[in-house]
Image (cartoon, rainbow, N blue to C red):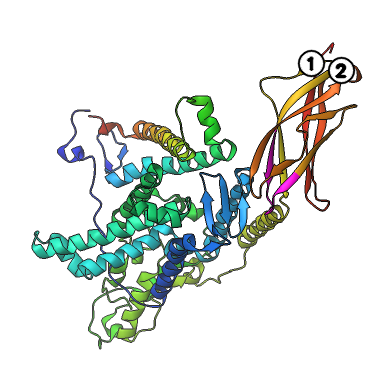
């Protein structure tokens, strides 16, 4: 920990793996749970019928799209959190 | 902020690479055994068939899950939730009892990292050679060694990805279709995805996953107390540490038992010094115990300078293994297991869901009021069931369709429309609760009931 000019404790920079990990991993985990819960109650085929009936979406595709969608969504939230929690000295 | 010093411009620090030294001993044998058993289960299970179906197959395309001869459907989802709760409480229990047993021996991150280290050692040699190789300029020898390592890493990762997908799509069909390049796009995608995750996590990120991403490492202290088993250095016995000749009289030199050989630091897969005390990074793999015991043997000192112990024992206080915390975790765990067993054995052979038709509430058919429904019938038995539908709860209520028996094949879910009617002059308006009953044609066969509501319009 180093003291910045304002007197607040400034955390030293973290490894890239830690930052990426802190964003990608919790969102991956959340996406897994959300996908499981969603498809425990909804058949992806039914979901396809009420969303894009003109496109043929198989169950495998449905699971994958939902998982990736959840992951992207949760990762956005995690990135937002990271952005809000960044020390102000990192914004030049 | 535009006045940052140049050193603050570095947004990322580089995590130094950890080169764990090879180690042998009691706990390392245990760890290797655990790796073989756990990875053996992972890689072999999908290849075992039971009565024509894969013994563990989470058949996502068909939305049914086969686990050791039992079949589950998405409707059984809460059982999975219960199973996860059991897993979590077990983790609590074992953590309170024996510390981070999970991390050191059973966590997939540890187990796969261990295997990737074996491959790394095979390709690049022991610790000092690996360190030297990474610093050395690119020679033909270095290229050969690195290429061999990459070949092993990638092949093993791909096989791991295939095996993973093999839990979701029959592996005996998946492997030939992958080899013939005509596998489904999603299977190929997930094979590569999981393969890449394995490659990255076990080949490169390794201890960083434990240090930066693992939530368990952060909350395990909540389950710890001074009676929990931890791996600790016996400071009292070891200090003051110092180098000495094997035949030196340590008492005359005023030294403790630690000979400052750095063995415990070199073997540590997370790159910490256990002598600094209990640390969040420690995954309790016990590699430092093994290496230190070996050194103690060589020096003729008693083993256990680094050992499994408790905070209380180190402070010369009595250690209490049987404590309220343990009984509470155990009680909750046993209750959950009992509940799971009860739910598992008490599953209905036939399950019926009755849904009201969303498009039409009712229809007038002459003097009768009709309501449309759809039936969702799950047959959890291993035989085909022929089921007849009856309805009760309102005067004159009768089933218009289906007229005959509904055939539901073994282990399948069948959707059927159902129409019920009542004479309009015999019922009052509003939603009326009724009961739908399914009976197998076979006398001893299964039956089930479900409740739904029948709508009668006012003035009907």
Residue at 25%, 86% (x, y): give it. Answer: B248
Camera sees residue B217: no
Image quadrant for the C terminus of chain B?
A: top right
Q: Residue at x 62, y 53 (%)?
A: B71
**Magenta stretch in the rendered image:** B375-386
Would you identify the image quadrant in which residue B55 lies? bottom right
Position of B39 compared to A18: left or right?
A: right
Q: Chain of mark 2?
A: B
Q: Residues within 10 Å of mark 2 (few under 14, many from 20)?
A: many
Residue sitting at x 78%, y 49%: B446
Label 1 neighbour load within 10 Å: few <14, some 14-19, many 20+: some
Q: Residue at x 36, y 79 (%)?
A: B293
User: Is disc 1 placed on a helix, strand or loop?
Assistant: strand
Is B132 drawn above or below residue A61 in the view shown? below
Residue at mark 1: B364
Looking at the rendered structure, the secondary structure element under dot 2 is helix
Mark 2 — residue?
A: B424
Q: Are marks 1 and 2 on the same chain?
A: yes
Mark positioned earlier in the residue sequence (1 or 2):
1
Q: Nearer the viewer, residue A6 or B324?
A: B324
Q: Position of residue B95 (x, y in %)?
A: 52, 61
């Amino acid at each position: 920990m180093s003291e910045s000019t304002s007197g607040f404790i400034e955390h030293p920079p973290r490894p890239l793996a830690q930052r990426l990990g802190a964003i990608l991993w919790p969102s991956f985990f959340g996406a897994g749970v959300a996908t499981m819960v969603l498809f425990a109650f909804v058949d992806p085929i039914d979901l396809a019928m009420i969303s894009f009936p003109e496109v043929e979406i198989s169950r495998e595709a449905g699971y994958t799209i939902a998982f990736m969608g959840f992951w992207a969504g949760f990762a956005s939230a995690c990135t937002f959190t990271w952005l809000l929690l960044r020390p102000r000295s990192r914004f030049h | 902020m535009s006045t940052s010093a140049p050193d603050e411009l570095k947004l990322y620090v580089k995590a130094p690479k950890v080169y764990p030294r090879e180690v042998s001993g009691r706990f390392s044998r245990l760890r290797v055994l655990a790796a073989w058993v756990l990875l053996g289960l992972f890689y072999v299970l999908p290849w075992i068939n039971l009565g024509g179906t894969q013994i563990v197959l989470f058949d996502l395309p068909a939305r049914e899950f086969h686990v050791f001869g039992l079949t589950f459907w998405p409707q059984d989802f809460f059982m999975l939730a219960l199973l996860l709760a059991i897993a979590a409480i077990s983790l609590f229990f074992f953590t309170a009892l024996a510390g981070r047993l999970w991390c050191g021996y059973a966590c997939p991150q540890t187990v796969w990292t261990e295997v990737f280290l074996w491959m790394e050692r095979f390709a690049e040699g022991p610790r000092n050679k690996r360190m030297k190789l990474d610093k050395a300029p690119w020679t033909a020898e270095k290229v050969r060694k690195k290429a061999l390592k990459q070949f092993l890493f990638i092949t093993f990762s791909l096989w791991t990805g295939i095996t993973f997908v093999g839990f979701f799509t029959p592996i005996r069909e998946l492997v030939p279709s992958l080899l013939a390049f005509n596998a489904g796009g999603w299977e190929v995608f997930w094979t590569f995805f999981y393969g890449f995750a394995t490659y990255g996590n076990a080949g490169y990120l390794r201890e960083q996953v434990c240090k930066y991403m693992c939530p368990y490492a952060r909350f395990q202290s909540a389950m710890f107390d001074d009676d929990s088993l931890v791996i600790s250095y016996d400071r009292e016995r070891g200090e003051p540490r110092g180098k000495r000749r094997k035949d030196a009289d340590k008492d005359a030199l005023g030294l403790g038992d630690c000979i400052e050989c750095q063995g415990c630091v070199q073997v540590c897969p997370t790159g910490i010094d256990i002598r600094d005390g209990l640390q969040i990074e420690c995954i309790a793999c016990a590699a430092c115990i093994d290496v230190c015991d070996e050194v103690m043997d060589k020096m003729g000192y008693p083993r256990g300078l680094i050992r499994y112990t408790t905070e209380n024992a180190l402070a010369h206080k009595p250690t209490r293994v049987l404590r309220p915390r343990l009984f509470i975790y155990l009680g909750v765990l046993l209750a959950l297991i009992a509940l799971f067993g009860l739910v598992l054995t008490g599953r209905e052979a036939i399950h019926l869901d009755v849904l009201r038709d969303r498009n039409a509430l009712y229809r007038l058919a002459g003097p009768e009021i009709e309501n449309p429904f759809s039936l969702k019938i799950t047959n959890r038995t291993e035989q085909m069931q022929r089921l007849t539908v009856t309805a009760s709860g309102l005067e004159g209520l009768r089933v218009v369709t289906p007229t005959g028996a509904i055939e539901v094949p073994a282990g399948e879910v069948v959707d059927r429309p159902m129409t019920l009617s009542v004479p309009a002059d015999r019922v009052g308006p509003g939603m009326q609760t009724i009961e739908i009953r399914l009976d197998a044609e076979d006398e001893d066969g299964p039956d089930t009931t479900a409740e739904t509501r029948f709508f009668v319009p006012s003035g009907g």
